[in-house]
Amino acid sequence: MSSEFFPEIPVIAYEGPDSKNPLAFKHYDAQATVGGKTMEEHLRFSMAYWHTLRNGLADPFGVPTAVRPWEGAEDSVENAQHRVRVAFEFMEKTGIKYYCFHDRDVAPEGATLAESNANLHAVADVLEEEQKRTGIKLLWGTACLFAHPRYNQGAATSPYADVFAYAAAQVKTAMDVTLRLGGEGYTFWGGREGYQTLLNTDIGRELKHLARFLHMAVDYAKAIGFGGQFYIEPKPKEPTKHQYDSDAAACLNFLREFDLLDHLKLNIETNHATLAGHTVQHELEVAAAAGALGSVDANTGDEMLGWDTDQFPTNIYMTTQIMLSLLRMGGFTTGGLNFDAKVRRESFEPVDLFHAHIGGMDAFARGLKIAQAIIDDGRLDAFVSERYSSYDSGIGLKIANGEVGFKELEAHVLENGEPGMTPSGRQEMLENLVNDFL
Ligand code: XUL
Ligand code: CO
């Protein structure tokens, strides 16, 4: 265990709900079992390299504030390699077993593609070494196709073919490195795959190009033997006015239309759901209903703000809802809870990174315990099953099985008459039931 960069901070231990130690878990007890699996197996926490290691905490009105004593003066490969050791010490001390990165978070972009590729592989050497030393794994990799000026009008949906080509070349190496590091997945977030104005935009062509790009990625994965899960991450806007992957339903429709649904699942992010005018539970349930819920970017927005604030999740009601959806799905297979979240600009000290992750992990541990208790209690699920039970037999079963049409149903109504008032939806009773477990 390394203790070079955060010498004052111990390995964060589980001390139980009565602890007053802010640098301890009150609820996350990695090896404790809940519903037959350990908390660690259920929650599969992941650190987002871009926020935790690379976010200087600038905002549109002010310069970076983050104090990161380990950073060298230059954005060099050596500095990037050194930073990897910091990242792994942080994960060892917080007990986080996975991480996610963009190519340009871990290694600096060079003057040419060849130089950028070499930089990335040089940093991957250290990532590989640290993964071996600690057992920490790569949940997913991705390529940053939104920061460089060449992508100002999109990457796979850029109107300019040479930009498309550059993006493809960049993803090729990002996939090579993800494979090399044993990554369990690869994510596509279309940061600039959308438009600022329809006056200059051909949506039909752009969507076709985006689909071509994803098919190329699927083909390349086959070619190199990458068996990880591909994810697409919905977000409606920011940085563009409208992004094509605007919400879970839009992504599913796109994947179906272009014959990609067998190859990609959804990576649902809480704050993106909010921007789309949905709850995260809505997005999770839409994805899960299509058998396409893959992973979660666990953060939260601010109810008063209309942008992507990427805060650490602390709302127990929300984590309970997320864990209910995940438990009902049978849990993650390749995915995990990736803290795509950043500390506030005002929380600039290294220790704040610990407070943030501890809080997020504890909030999910509580959500897990509460959700499992609700499931074990059974009343909520029994209510829902009972609500749909008229489709389990008789005419309902025939409807569900496609054995009847309008003519048969007309005959059914003529024979049976008015169905009468339905049972109550009991929303308030169910809300009270859930609250009883909090
Ligand atoms: C941006 C966002 C990304 C993706 C990965 O809002 O969520 O960081 O998670 O590209
Ligand atoms: Co995200």
Image (spheres, rainbow, N blue to C red):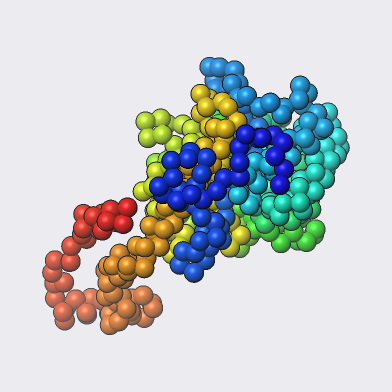
Judge whether 395 appears above or below 41 on screen: below
Q: Position of residue 295 (x, y in %)?
A: 55, 54
Question: Residue 425's spot in the image, x, y percent?
Answer: 22, 60
* Residue 170 visible in this rendered orientation of the protein: yes
The residue that appears at 32% across and 78% down in the rendered structure is: 392
Please tell me which residue lies in front, 299 or 173. 299
Reply above or below: 352 against 221: above
Q: Position of residue 283 (x, y in %)?
A: 44, 51
Residue 280 in sight from this viewpoint? no
- Whole-percent x, y for residue 391 in the image: 31, 75
For the residue pair 117 and 13, the one nearer the viewer reads as 13
The structure residue drawn at horizontal position 51% and vertical position 50%, both measured from the top left corner, is 14
Q: Left or right: 195 with respect to 156?
A: left
Residue 409 figure quarter: bottom left
Nearer to me, 433 or 352: 352
Residue in front for this viewpoint, 370 or 100:
370
Residue 59 falls left or right of residue 86 = left
Q: Residue at x 44, y 57 (%)?
A: 368
| Residue 159 as seen in the image, left or right of residue 297 | right
Residue sitting at x 39%, y 59% = 371
Q: How many marks?
A: 0
Quadrant hosting residue 67: top right
Establish if 134 lies above or below 41.
Answer: above
